[in-house]
Amino acid sequence: MRLVLLEDEPPAMAQLRAAVVAARPDARVEAELATLAAARAWFSTHPTPDLVISDIILADGNALALFREGRVRCPVVFATAHDAYLLEAFRCAAIDYLLKPIDPHAVARALDKHRDLRTLLAPQSAEAIAEASAAEPHARGARRRILARLGTELRAVGVDEVAYFLAGDKLTVLVTTDGHELLVDRSLSALGLELDPTTFFRTNRASLVNVRSVRSFRSLGKGRLEVKLSPARVVCVSQENGAAFKAWMGR
Amino acid sequence: MTRYLLSTSDEHTVTLGEEIDLTQRYASLLSIRFGDAFRLELIDEGADRSATLPPTSLQLLVENAAKHNAFHAERPLVVELALRPGEVVVTNTRVPREDARVGGAALGLENLAERVRLCTHRPLVIEETLQRFRVTVPLGAPTGAA
């Protein structure tokens, strides 16, 4: 854990440092800063730490200015003799507010809170990522090549070489821009999730097309579209997908 | 210090010697708090230590200096007490804090000026430049001599 301490009074700084080290022997205090000027210089030249513990009234001004200026973009525990800044402190990224004289136990509790908040907040985003990747086994648009079979031969076809995919008879056929047809061991739905959605569109249940292979399209009425592809093929876009297709083509 | 404040609370004046003693105790507390960033310098230019002044007047000026200025180890706050016959000149280096409140010192200083006027019938003189803040505290005659 990387920490920065802001405190203008040497004895208070020593107490704070001792309390931090006692609570977290593995914590690394990267800087001990006494003034706003020193803090501004440090934060503009160093990577953001995990946590800042900060006095509010520093030797040359009010430390809340640093947070208002957006210079410090990490959680902060304020340690001050004043209770007047409570609300403003929590409007910054305050996670705790310790009143002086500093109780080492209160510092330990604040560090525990920081750790707990990290685990509380982090799994949520990890969960979101897990959910997203459950829906999309690989990040959307990440796939660059498709493994396809031509007879007994396997080929990695670059995404740019794919004109469209067709599904039929439980097989997925990849049609390359130069007209070759290969077999792919994946469903259209699975492929659709792995490919860049700005490039590939699921025109209907049986086709997934690359935007570059679309020659032209026309309305069949009632929102249905007929799409001419190259290499030569005609596919239909259903009524419910028509508007989405047009929007996608125009992107 | 608290004992001094209690024991002088009934008195309108204390001797310069007593007040210097208090101010030095107060300054030593500030030195513990701020380390090398704070310094009090006493310059004796022949003041009579039995001369009188309102209690805590010098202490208040030191407190004000520490309250209103930005200072740190590389640019310390230096408060100078020049003890002259008939007056004490308190000068401090002046570096306003970023969050300085305009006129924040006014109440304490006004109050002190009033107390000084009542006890010596002479005014407190305040001089302010960009680099320095200086207050001249007139001293009253030693008690008993008056």
Image (tube, grey):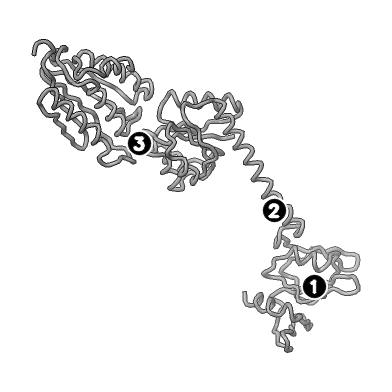
Residue drawn at x 66%, y 79% as measured from the top left: A246
Front in this rendered view, residue B125 or A212: B125
Q: Which residue is mark 2?
A: A128
Q: Residues within 10 Å of mark 2 (few under 14, many from 20)?
A: few
Q: Which residue is mark 3?
A: A60
Q: Can marks 2 and 3 be said to lie on one chain?
A: yes
Figure quadrant of the C terminus of chain B: top left
Front in this rendered view, residue A5 or A166: A5
Front in this rendered view, residue A208 or A96: A96
Which residue occupies the extreme front position in the image?
B10
Q: Residues within 10 Å of mark 3 (few under 14, many from 20)?
A: many
Instruction: Name the subunit of mark 3.
Output: A
SS type, badge 3: loop
Type of the residue with mark 3? Asp
For residue A143, which quarter of the picture?
A: bottom right
Name the side, left or right, on which B62 lies relative to A184.
Answer: left
SS type, badge 2: helix
Q: In the image, is residue A31 above or below residue A207?
A: above
Q: Which residue is mark 1?
A: A165
**C-alpha gap between disc 2 and disc 1:** 30 Å
**C-alpha gap between disc 3 and disc 1:** 67 Å
Asked if disc 2 and disc 3 are in contact, CB closer than 8 Å, the reply is no
Type of the residue with mark 1? Phe
Q: Nearer the viewer, mark 2 or mark 1?
A: 2
Residue drawn at x 21%, y 31% as measured from the top left: B111
